[in-house]
Amino acid sequence: MVWTWRFEKADGTETAPAVEPEEFTTQGDAESWLGENWKDLLEGGAEQVTLFEDGAEIYVMSLRAAAES
């Protein structure tokens, strides 16, 4: 299994990430990476992220909401 992130602007259009991710072998590794890098991603223009497992969408998460928590 391969877990990947897609980075999006607020309107859902894809954008290049400020921090280049790798492909992850577990969901936990992908989520840990995001937890370490979300602030830099948000500052770089990504407003939300989508997690995929082998190309299948798992969930969408707002980085802006994380910043407001």
Image: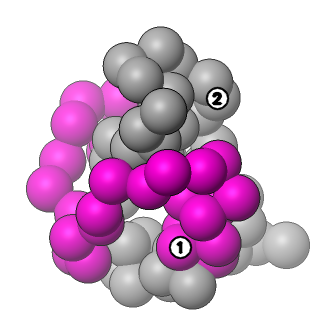
Residue beneath disc 2: 59
Could you say which is closer to the camera, residue 55 or residue 9? 55
Nearer mark to the viewer, of 2 and 1: 1
Q: Which residues are magenta?
A: 8-35
The residue sitting at 55% across, 58% down in the picture is: 30
One can see residue 59 in this view: yes
Q: Is residue 36 above or below residue 21?
A: below
The residue sitting at 72% across, 66% down in the picture is: 66
- Figure colour scheme: one colour
**Magenta-drawn stretch contains 43:** no
Q: Is residue 33 above or below residue 17?
A: below
Where, quadrant-wise, is the C terminus in this rendering? bottom right
**Does the magenta stretch mainly form a helix, a strand or a loop?**
loop
- The residue type indicated by label 1 comes to Trp
Identify the secondary structure beneath mark 2: strand
- The residue type indicated by label 2 comes to Tyr
Residue beneath disc 1: 33
Which comes sooner in the sequence, label 2 or label 1? 1
> Toward which corner of the image does residue 19 lie, by quadrant?
bottom left
